[in-house]
Amino acid sequence: MSSASLTLYELAGADPELRFSPHCWKTRMALAHKGLESQRIAWRFSDKARIAFSRQGAVPVLVDGDQSISDSWRIALHLEQRYPERPSLFGGRDAVALSAFVNRWADSMLLPAVARVILLDVYEQLADEDREYFRSSREAHFGTSLEQLVAPQARHLEQLRQVLTPLRQTLKGQPFLAGEAPAYADYCVFGMFMWARCTSGEELLAPNDILHAWRERLLDAFGGLARAATLASPSRLEHAMSNDPALHDFAVRSSDKIRYADTDRQGHVNNAVFATFLETGRVEIIYDPHAPLAEPGSEFVIARLELDLRAELRWPGTVQIGTRVATLGKSSMTLEQALFQDGRCAALATTVIVQIDAQSRRSKPFGEEARRRLGALTTAADSFAVK
Ligand SMILES: N[C@@H](CCC(=O)N[C@@H](CS)C(=O)NCC(=O)O)C(=O)O
């Protein structure tokens, strides 16, 4: 039977070949299980209009002849019903309800647990036009920034491995969740692992984990279909795993719009403007109009500014500024700052600020209140030395 009439819309990253959606992977595996070929179309979050015909805004969307089906579960049911002569996707009628349970479990328990480990990596792989939407929608969903969400990564990895316990116990008695051969229940879970594999450098499973061997078997299934998947670009991964600080490492976070006028003949933000962005972050601490840090008769002056330019800032966009107190002396403090665009660290800076007497112009010790407030802005993160 020809299957040329099947078209699958799949979520893609900045690299159109990077197809990482967990739900789309369920459908990829389901199509392969049925031995069906499809035309695969890269889709991005900002491309809602292209799937408007499906009357909803998420992928996968499968177009089968004149029918369009959205939602990976509904697609699975459709494939089973439409192609009954091909291998059963569920392993028989009775297994449909149990597979539905596994799918719900994977979506409601496993997906959030994986998200807490990889969601910032996912963000790193997205096309620029998708980033703001992804960040704001996912941050609203989880009620915290992407950086904060994934911050206790070791703990989240531990929690994820706990969530996987019933799968491990099941696989002690059989090679696949569905039994002797893989079926849709396996693909529901495997989709989550493909999501991580395609976007993140994080290894979710220890090599001696029974699930590791199960995942290997599925990577090899259907001629190594999943193993051949395009993976995250090494440069983006490298960035995500670099030792650069992240915005969440800073106690004070601000942002500035990058203006066209900030760019120079080289088309990037001019280096002198970096210092102005840093100032935006510092004044949030020093010149809060409702609670000025300087006591009456006192002012702050900069004694030193060290700036390490690490990447370009580009118009249009927004720059995020992280600021923290590194050390607090008698009348001076050292601030550490970093600039970020789209999660990428563009500059590191260290500034020494001295409190002076407005009249005598000489240094003047901080009062108790200022010391308390500045003390609260230090972070446990390792200090960086600008070189
Ligand atoms: N229950 C749906 C979930 C589909 C879904 O959430 N897809 C994501 C990609 S992984 C999406 O397209 N989201 C659109 C959006 O967030 O606007 C399914 O199983 O297909």
Image: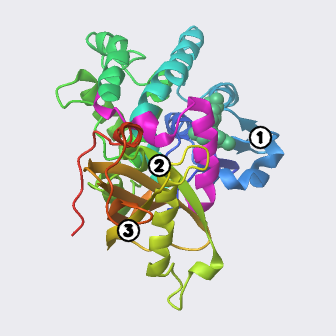
Q: Which residue is mark 3?
A: 361
Mark 2 touches mark 1? (CB < 8 Å) = no
- Mark 2 or 1: the one toward you: 2
Provide the residue designation for mark 2: 295
Q: Is residue 39 left or right of residue 230?
A: right
Q: Is 342 positioned to the left or the right of 206 in the image?
A: right
Sequence-wise first label, 3 or 1: 1
Q: Secondary structure at mark 2?
A: loop
**Which range is magenta?**
127-154
Q: Amino acid at mark 3?
A: Arg
Among all residues in the image, which is located at the extreme front? 360
Q: Position of residue 361 (x, y in %)?
A: 38, 68
Query: How far separated are the C-alphas under marks 2 and 1?
Result: 67 Å
| Residue 47 can be seen, yes or no | yes
Q: Which tag, 2 or 3, sits closer to the chain's start?
A: 2
213 falls in the magenta region: no
Of residues 134 and 183, the one drawn nearer to the viewer in this rendering: 134
Q: Relative to the observer, which residue lies in front, 93 or 75?
A: 75
- Residue of label 1: 68
Residue 10 higher or lower than 360, as above or below? above
Q: Nearer the viewer, mark 3 or mark 1?
A: 3
Predominant secondary structure in magenta?
helix
Ligand 1 lies under 8 Å from the Cβ of mark 2: no
